[in-house]
Image (tube, grey):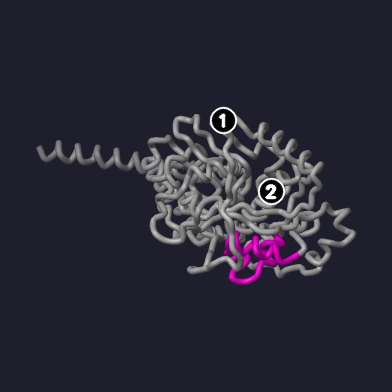
Amino acid sequence: MLYRVAIASAIVATAFAQVRVVEAPQKDQEWEDYKKMYKKTYESPADERERQSLFEASKQRVARLNEVNKKAGNAFGINWFSDRKPDEMNKRGHVKPEGWTPTAPVKDYKATRRANPPAALDWQFTSAVTAIKNQGQCGSCWAFSATEAVESQLVLSSGNQVRIELAPQQTTSCTPSPAQGCNGGFTEAAYEYMGTVTGLTNSFNYPYMQSLTATSATQACNTAKVAAIDGPMMQLTGGYAAVSGYHYATTPCTSGACANQDLAALQAAIETTPVSVCVNAASWNDYTGGVMTSAACGSMAAKAQDHCVMATGFNTTAPTPYWIVRNSWSSTWGEYGYIYLEMAENTCGIADDATIPEVALDLTDAQKAKVAAGRERLYQKAVLAQ
């Protein structure tokens, strides 16, 4: 009897040993595949061991998030961020001082809804939205969101006659305190800064350099480039945008849970223009595609906001209706640089801090008619389903 038990124990021990032998190479192969896919290199063997441990933790976190997100299917997976440390992943950049108030009155955006509003719309398929950018290690999301919102307004307000890629580096470097450059800021501060200077220059004149550095040190404001905005060189370098103010697409939520924001107002605004929005992006690092539910995203509260992006559209015809949101983490992230957020609730706090800048254009009546026609053509191109 003891002999049989000993044999059985030996068999079990051998089986466990085989499992361990198989499991370790499988993990190592997954790690090697990951490094190859994302062209990862590390400073030392010790650094690589730490990164592999973070990678394994990411796989467990992804499984938990997909379980929470199950009503909309899997939306999380392994990506470039999967071997990152928490402090490396958290450089998103939305920081608004508690109790901050605008220096001048801000109007709510009154969007006139059409008699037959679209069921699905996305401005990214028009010239009103430029290509996906990459903010790099700099916490400049707020500057990208504000700058890209101005780009969109310039195209729409000119009826597609003026198309300029503007300079998030100017916004990042030159917006004064309480914005802190790569250490964080907020879109309203960016708009207020833009209103104090001649305008926001183009990216050719003032290219973005922060993504090229491993640190988050903010470049000093290049006052010479800003001063040259209204000079003759602008005819050669592509022009600029003059900002005259901004609007809130929804009533801002600054405290509490923010669960009852006006989603209809946000949808109505997006029907007329892309909208800058600030959100809770704590779960976004693991996003790989599909619809992220409100449950998976977590808190909607204003205090949870840590990232600013741009809402470019929505799709109410999908099994789980969603907002279409443009990010600034490169086109290799998510849905080619975009994320889909569940529409049923104030997912990630998308309607907490939604803003639309106003550009200054001096138009004649004849030009205004031309602008209206051009804007309508852009709208028709943005509509995906009626």
Residue beneath disc 2: 153
Q: Position of residue 55 (x, y in %)?
A: 47, 50
Q: Amino acid at mark 2?
A: Gln
Spot occupied by residue 82 in the image (x, y as percentages of width and height): 50, 49
**Closer to the camera, 222 or 242?**
242
Q: Which mark is residue 265?
A: none
203 sits to left or right of 88: right
Whole-percent x and y of residue 59? 43, 46
Q: From what the image shows, is residue 28 above or below residue 173?
A: above
Amino acid type indicated by mark 1: Asn
Residue 147 visible to the viewer: yes
Toward the top, the furthest residue is 386
Indicate the quadrant where residue 382 lies.
top right
Q: Earlier in the sequence, mark 2 or mark 1?
A: 1
Crowd rating for badge 1 (residues with CA inside 10 Å; few <14, some 14–19, many 20+): few
Which residue occupies 48% across, 68% down?
98
Label 2 Cα crowd, 10 Å radius (few <14 / some 14-19 / many 20+):
many
Query: Which residue is at 61% across, 52% downward?
Result: 356
User: Mark 1 highlights which residue?
Assistant: 116
Q: In percent of the image, x 24 and y 39: which residue is there?
A: 12
Badge 1 marks a residue whose secondary structure is loop
Query: Where does residue 131 sit, x and y in percent of width and height?
Result: 69, 44
State which region is magenta. Answer: 169-197
> At numbered mark 2, what does the secondary structure look like: helix, strand or loop?
helix
Q: Residue at x 36, y 43 (%)?
A: 20
Name the residue at the right extreme.
232
Furthest toward the front, the residue is 365
**Between tags 2 and 1, which lies in front?**
1
Residue 1's quadrant in the figure?
A: top left
User: Along the line of sight, which residue is nearer the eye, 376 or 339?
Assistant: 376
Residue 108 in the magenta stretch? The answer is: no
